[in-house]
Amino acid sequence: MESAAMGEMVMAGFGKLGFIQYTGISGVDFAPGRTVMSIAPRREHLNHNGDLHAAVLFGLAETAAMGAAVSGIVDLMGATFIVARDGRISYIARAGGDSGPFLAASELSAETLEQVRADIAARKPIELEVPVSITDCAEKLVATAYFTAVIRPRRAS
């Protein structure tokens, strides 16, 4: 399956999620092991300082991380169960509501994807650390994050 078709498939799946609809998160770039997501702040996303609320930034980062984790295994999703186990984020600079849109980029190496695919084929459980960086419209780094994607063999029905 081509990257563009995989990207459309994953984005269509994400687009069905209520959180994605609420936030207006959208896909910008999608390739095996790479996902870039975007959010244009709306009034309901801002905190008391007029900045993008920390929880919204965290959600944007998690969406990008899980997108990157899924992006290289879309064709194997029927055999796997994937979920975020944990995440941590460092807020580096203000995410002013007028500094958007914000981009969350997450990328895994080709070697990591190859190992994940081999582990899925061997039905091995996987815990994968997925990095994310969030920038504003001036490409200033606003936050960095790491999420653990847990990938397990799907149980027989």
Image (cartoon, grey):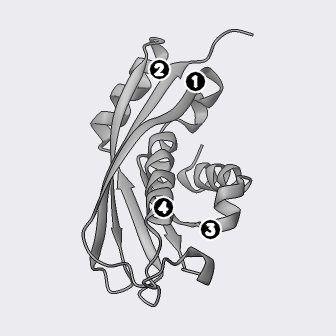
Q: Read off the residue under disc 2.
A: 120
Which of discs 2 and 3 lies nearer the camera? The answer is 3
Residue most toward the bottom? 98
Q: Position of residue 33 (x, y in %)?
A: 41, 46
| As drawn, 15 above or below 98 | above
Of labels 2 and 3, earlier in sequence is 3
Ranked by sequence position, the earlier of labels 2 and 4 is: 4
Callout 3: 10 Å neighbours few (<14), some, many (20+)?
A: some
Work out how far the residue at label 1 is from the one at label 2, CA to CA, in angstroms: 7 Å
Residue 100's disc is none
Q: Quadrant of the C terminus?
A: top right
Q: Amino acid at mark 1?
A: Thr
Residue where numbered disc 4 is placed: 55
Q: CA distance from mark 4 to mark 3?
A: 11 Å
Indicate the position of residue 62 as horizontal and vertical percent values. 46, 51
Pointer 1 with pointer 2, Cβ within 8 A: yes
Tag in front: 4 or 3? 4
Instruction: Report which residue position mark 1 lands on.
Output: 80
Residue positioned most to the front: 48
| Residues packed near mark 4 inside 10 Å, few (<14), some (14 to 19) or many (20 plus) | few
Task: Please tell me which residue is depicted at 58% across the width and 38% down the height of the picture.
Answer: 74
Q: Pinpoint residue 105: horizontal percent, then vertical percent.
A: 38, 61
Identity, as a three-letter code, of the amino acid under mark 3: Thr
Mark 2 and mark 3: span between their CA atoms?
32 Å
Total numbered labels = 4
- Of pointers 3 and 1, the one earlier in the residue sequence: 3
Viewport quadrant of the N terminus: top right
| Above-or-below relation of 114 to 140 | above
**Is 124 located above or below residue 38 in the figure?**
above
For disc 3, the marked residue is: 23
Pointer 4 and pointer 3: residues touching (CB < 8 Å)?
Answer: no
